[in-house]
Image (cartoon, grey):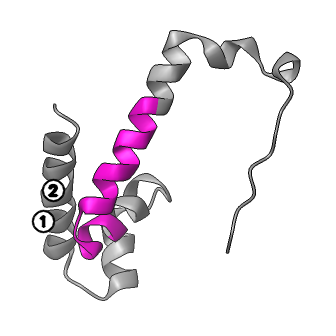
Amino acid sequence: AKTRAVEVPVDEVDEGLLQPESLADVEGALTLHQCLSRLAEPSRRLILMAYLRGLTYEEIATQESVPIGTVKSRVFRGLTQLKECMGQ
């Protein structure tokens, strides 16, 4: 699906968005998105299930029909790769 750019008049932009902290947050979010896209699909999916959806490792293991050890190792590997990619 295509997305359309929406023009917002300058006087309607929240000035808080223009603060360096916010710009750093946006940059960090973009970096995180790029780094997530580089992960292998299983690691990316499990990380998103755990950290975005708030599922426990046990819940993920049940949903994915894999042993809990597999969930833990894929999440650990993915988080390690994310840290490297984001320069930490």
User: Can you say whether 46 is above or below 35 in the image?
Assistant: below
- Residue occupying image coordinates x 75% and y 58%: 4
Percent across and percent down for residue 47 are: 33, 60
Percent across and percent down for residue 16 are: 68, 13
User: Can you say whether 77 is above or below 61 in the image?
Assistant: above
Which range is magenta?
27-45
**In the rendered structure, are the residues bearing label 2 and label 1 in contact, judged by CB atoms less than 8 Å apart?**
yes
**Residue nearest the observer in this picture, 19 or 52:** 19
Quadrant in which residue 29 is drawn: top left
Residue that numbered label 1 is attached to: 73
Percent across and percent down for residue 24 are: 44, 22
Is 73 left or right of 40, judged from the image as shown? left
**Local secondary structure at mark 2:** helix
Going by the numbered disc 2, the residue's amino acid type is: Phe
Quadrant in which residue 59 is drawn: bottom left
Is 1 left or right of 10, judged from the image as shown? left
User: Can you say whether 13 is above or below 57 in the image?
Assistant: above
Residue that numbered label 2 is attached to: 76
Q: Quadrant of the C terminus?
A: top left
